[in-house]
Amino acid sequence: MKELKLVFTLMTAAFVLVSCQKDAQVEEGSAYFGGEVVNPKNNFVILSRAENVLDTIRLDENNRFLYKIENVEKGLYTFRLWASEGLEFQMVLLEPHDSLLFRLNTLEFDESLVYTGRGAKKNNYLINMFLDGETEDKTILGFSQSPPMEFERKLDSIRNYKLTKLRQFNSKYPSSETFNSLVKGNINYDYYLSKEVYPFVNYANNERSNFNKLPKDFYDYRKEIDYNYCELMDYFPYYSFLKHHFENIALAEHFKKSNDSVFNIKSLSYNLIKLNLIDSLMTNDSIKNSLLAQTAVEFISNSKNPEEYDTVLKSFASKNTNTKNYQYLNNMVGSLKGLKTGEGLPEVTLVDYRNNELDLNTLINKPTVIYFWSSVYRSHNDSHRKAEELKVKYPEVNFIAINATSNNQANWKKLIAQFNYSKDNEFMFKSPEIAKHKLAIAPINKVMIVDKKGMIVNAHTNMFSIMFEEELLGLLNQ
């Protein structure tokens, strides 16, 4: 369940930051936010509110900081810092007169995070709820194969337990309306998310059949959905719910107009329906633009049909109001059209561990897998582990790892040493933004396969796909 909830963030990190675009809930009174970072990987913390970076705050000689927010806008804030596996982030609830301090160890980011001071109890509650969710996801996945009525009964039990815990907390530590709205929203939309995902995790591999077996009132909660829930707009469970909710209702509409019986993310009809539903139901431009962009990126990343790129881009453009998102999608489509099967790779300059500059094409002298990574995403370690497994199974294939975002050689080398990656197969781009455009690197964990002559076999695949090894075998048997 956790993987299902999180996988899409790799594709949409550039689009997810949103803002509520209504009158800010600003009250007289400041708030203090500070903390101590154990084993810091860099000497600063980035504090943000929605789309806006408030400040980059330096750590002192004791790896501590304290920051004052004047006339604080009550709600969720995000703090980011470099940790053992890259750039990590966590959300914190701040309200007027809070004086909140945290302590964390970058080696165990979320698990070590503890708050003290005024505002600590509510934030410790939130972080514990987040950590408990990881265990809860496994529990829900375990009974997702149950019949709908049994699944619903068990899911109801989990939600009621969490609501009871909230009431007990409030009886002991009376909390603000903002806190209670946030926690109840989290509980409810996490519950809704599990129900939206249910037809997709059933191993029958026939979503139409799964839909037909659901009780008529299974989705009655949809009458209560707030498509403009400002208090949760920046909170991951709400965005994750919306993403899967639109997948679900778009698929139901698609089934009415087709003979399909399974979920096919490459279906043009399904994706156009999804774009239309997002446009018609979402009222907040920021989150609507994010969902539209995520849908378009996901489709274009999976489709191999250039004509369909244009159809989806046109639909997206008619609904999107974010100029940067349109430019990103338009550039992506242009780059993908240039990466045709059977043609060579564009010229891209790499830098190796010894600071030598070389063209990507000069590295290819046998069937090659090129995979990309970034320290911003934790998944880079998974990608490297998968590549090492495949190297053993397919020694005839060369594997090249390229850091797609770093422009700092010292930091890049530090990461390679930290994770013990092979120095001989690791590279970075000399000009990351130019290279990412030329190679259409979206999502960041995309993979390219080329033959021994450097001709493109697949410009957009995934090492974790069940079909990936079949692609490699097909290449080796040519």
Image (cartoon, rainbow, N blue to C red):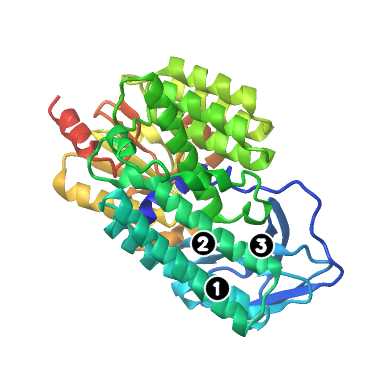
Instruction: Look at the picture and state if 130 lies above or below 286.
Output: below
Instruction: Look at the picture and state if 420 lies above or below 466.
Output: below
Instruction: Look at the picture and state if 139 lies above or below 198.
Output: below
Tell me the CA gap for discs 3 and 2.
16 Å
Residue denoted by label 1: 166
- Mark before the other along the chain sequence, 3 or 2: 3
Q: Would you say the residues marked 1 and 2 are in contact, meaning their CB atoms lie under 8 Å apart?
A: yes
Q: Position of residue 353 (x, y in %)?
A: 41, 53
Q: Position of residue 179 (x, y in %)?
A: 65, 68
Circle 1 SS class: helix
Residue type, numbered disc 1 = Leu
Residue at image coords 27%, 34%: 209
Tell me the CA gap for discs 3 and 1.
19 Å
Residue type, numbered disc 3 = Leu
Say whether residue 259 is left or right of residue 193: left
Residue denoted by label 3: 76
**In which image quadrant can residue 81 be found?**
bottom right
Q: Would you say the residues marked 3 and 2 are in contact, meaning their CB atoms lie under 8 Å apart?
A: no
Q: Nearer the viewer, residue 237 or 454?
A: 237
Residue at image coords 87%, 69%: 28
Residue denoted by label 2: 187
Circle 2 SS class: helix
Say whether residue 416 is left or right of residue 124: left
In this view, which residue lies farthest toward the right?
Answer: 28
Say whether residue 158 is left or right of residue 175: left
- Mark before the other along the chain sequence, 3 or 1: 3
Residue at image coords 16%, 39%: 396
